[in-house]
Amino acid sequence: MTDTLLNHRSIRKYKKDPIPYTILQYILEAGTRASTTGNMQLYSIIVTTKNEIKEQLAPCHFNQPMVKEAPVVLTFCADFNRFNTWCRLRKAEPGYDNFLSFFTAAIDALLVAQNVCVAAEDAGLGICYLGTTTYMAGKIIDILDLPGGVVPVTTVTVGYPDEWPEQTDRLPLEAVVHREKYSEYSDHDIEELYREKELMASYQAFVKEHKKETLAQVFTDVRYKKEDNVLFSKSLLDILTKQGFMNHP
Ligand SMILES: Cc1cc2nc3c(=O)[nH]c(=O)nc-3n(C[C@H](O)[C@H](O)[C@H](O)COP(=O)(O)O)c2cc1C
């Protein structure tokens, strides 16, 4: 299993072969053994295999080709709908129409997503997360018929790899691990920790391609811009209100 984790790379090109039903069931079964808050399983997983629905979903993911090309698209949702319904049927009044409950369910959904991903990779499949889900949650809700209490939080495309890209870099372990307490970074630490990344030819080409001065500017000015973050934050907050998670005046 550690080999599987150490070998991870996102796969964005898939063979046309479908995923056999038993294998898909197996990775979903393994995924749902993930830890879950109070064993409430506050998530749902929407399995999309039909081309017609993938075609509807594709624009929500900014037409990233994996959505139509992967045999399976999994949308992981924070879901209090099922649990609330059970509570009401059993004379229990749910108090889960608030932001904390959304966050709790989102954590559950992300944990199950990552376990499904690891199980898929261990079974020889490739995966790629799609962060576009939170940007376009409203449209995805309509397409997948998600009721109140349910919010999509991430999407994963799954299929047999038709590429085996170089592994991406990671910061050195000491950049992300703090011993006992958080040790604040000096400017010198940051210079040291990011040096190797900044010197990589692939990132230097990226900086040139976008006519920027530094790699950080590619993130702030091109890939994850403030105006987009503000726009999508507002739409996500509206969705949380609409789906019943912001009831704390
Ligand atoms: C929450 C999340 C959202 C992501 N969204 C996208 C995406 O929309 N498109 C994409 O091609 N990759 C996406 N990725 C994959 C990352 O780009 C990838 O994990 C990162 O570059 C590291 O590469 P690796 O997974 O191959 O190690 C996403 C990853 C995460 C965790």
Image (spheres, rainbow, N blue to C red):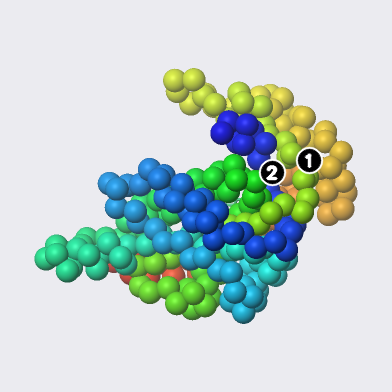
Residue occupying the point 59% across, 42% down: 122
Residue at image position (69%, 43%) is 9
Q: Please, is residue 78 above or below residue 1 in the view?
A: below
Secondary structure found at label 1: loop
Q: Position of residue 55 (x, y in %)?
A: 65, 76
Residue bearing the label numbered 1: 166
Q: Is mark 2 within 8 Å of ligand 1?
A: yes
Where residue 191 sits: x, y (%)? Answer: 72, 28
Residue positioned 38% across, 74% down in the render: 147
Quarter of the image containing the N terminus?
top right
Q: In percent of the image, x 29 and y 52: which residue is there? A: 40
Where does residue 78 sit, x and y in percent of width and height?
Answer: 41, 60
Q: Which residue is mark 2?
A: 9
Residue closer to the observer: 144 or 135: 144
In depth, the one of 58 and 214 nearer the eye is: 58
Give the position of the C terminus as an image quadrant.
bottom left
Residue 110 visible at all: no
Identify residue type, mark 2: Arg
Residue 166 seen in render: yes
Q: Are marks 1 and 2 in contact (CB under 8 Å)?
A: yes
Kindly identify the amino acid type of the residue bearing the numbered disc 1: Glu
Within 10 angstroms of label 2, few (less than 14), some, or many (20 or more) residues? Answer: some
Q: Is residue 82 left or right of residue 16?
A: left
The CA span between labels 1 and 2 is 8 Å
Closer to the chain start, of discs 1 and 2, is 2
In the image, 182: left or right of 20? left
